[in-house]
Amino acid sequence: MTTYPEDGSPAGGDGTGEEGGTRAERTPSPTLLQVGDAFPTAALVRSGAALLGPAVMYFYPKDGTTTCTLEAAAFQRAAQCPAAGVQVVGVSTDDESHACFARDQGIGFHLVSDPDATLTASVGVLKDYGEHGELAARVTFLLDGSSTVRRVFEVGDDVTSHREAVLAEA
């Protein structure tokens, strides 16, 4: 996982992504929101997910896939921990599948559907997955109470410990 602290400089990691891939191959977009940028909350309000304070906005590729299900379960455990003090919101380019995915996995936090990828593209996390099309890259933004980006996490393969790193920063 590559994270960017409040000063925006890269911290940790050796620049490699998933096995065999380089950072350049997995970087979602040159327009990735950076620390200090305002998160576009208008798209969230339209989806019924108004932010009520500090938040974890995590983007993921697809409902129901093994890795995305593991990540959602990890964030569900975080959402049930009031000591964390942050709202958790998941975003993908899926549409109606969110309701079934949330019900089947016992997810109690809000999942934002972005089927036209407007929000996903606006924060710079739209990624071309070849035959699967353009989907959200696995990126998490930690926002303060005024919806300003305080940390950016580009997530590799270990989606379950990713939650721990995010909560430690929160």
Image (cartoon, helix red, strand yellow):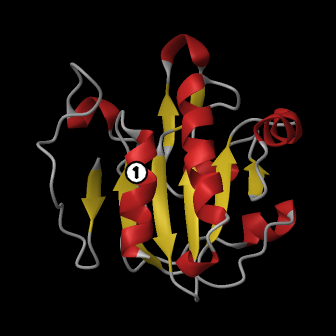
Tell me the residue at 29%/78% (across/down): 6
One can see residue 48 in this view: yes
Tell me where residue 127 appears, x and y as whole percent. Answer: 48, 34
Tell me the residue at 55%/66% (across/down): 56
Q: Is residue 31 left or right of residue 43?
A: left
Residue at the far top: name it. 131
One can see residue 85 in this view: no
Residue 168, by quadrant, is bottom left
Q: Is residue 38 above or below residue 10?
A: below
Tell me the residue at 33%/40% (across/down): 27
State the residue in front, 7 or 32: 7
Tell me the residue that label 1 is attached to: 162
Q: Is residue 163 above or below residue 55?
A: above
Tell me where residue 144 appears, x and y as whole percent. Answer: 51, 83
Tell me where residue 60 appears, x and y as whole percent. Answer: 57, 41
Tell me the residue at 74%/41% (across/down): 116
Q: Amino acid at mark 1?
A: His
State the residue in front, 111 or 166: 166
Residue at the far bottom: name it. 146
Q: Is residue 160 left or right of residue 70?
A: left
Residue 28, by quadrant, is top left
Tell me where residue 20 appears, x and y as whole percent. Answer: 21, 19
Q: Quadrant of the C terminus?
A: bottom left
Q: How many marks overall?
A: 1
Q: Is residue 147 above or below residue 90?
A: below
State the residue in front, 83 or 50: 83
Q: Is residue 102 left or right of residue 18?
A: right
Q: Secondary structure at mark 1?
A: helix
* Mark 1 surroundings within 10 Å by alpha-carbon count, few (fewer than 14), some (14 through 19), many (20 or more): many
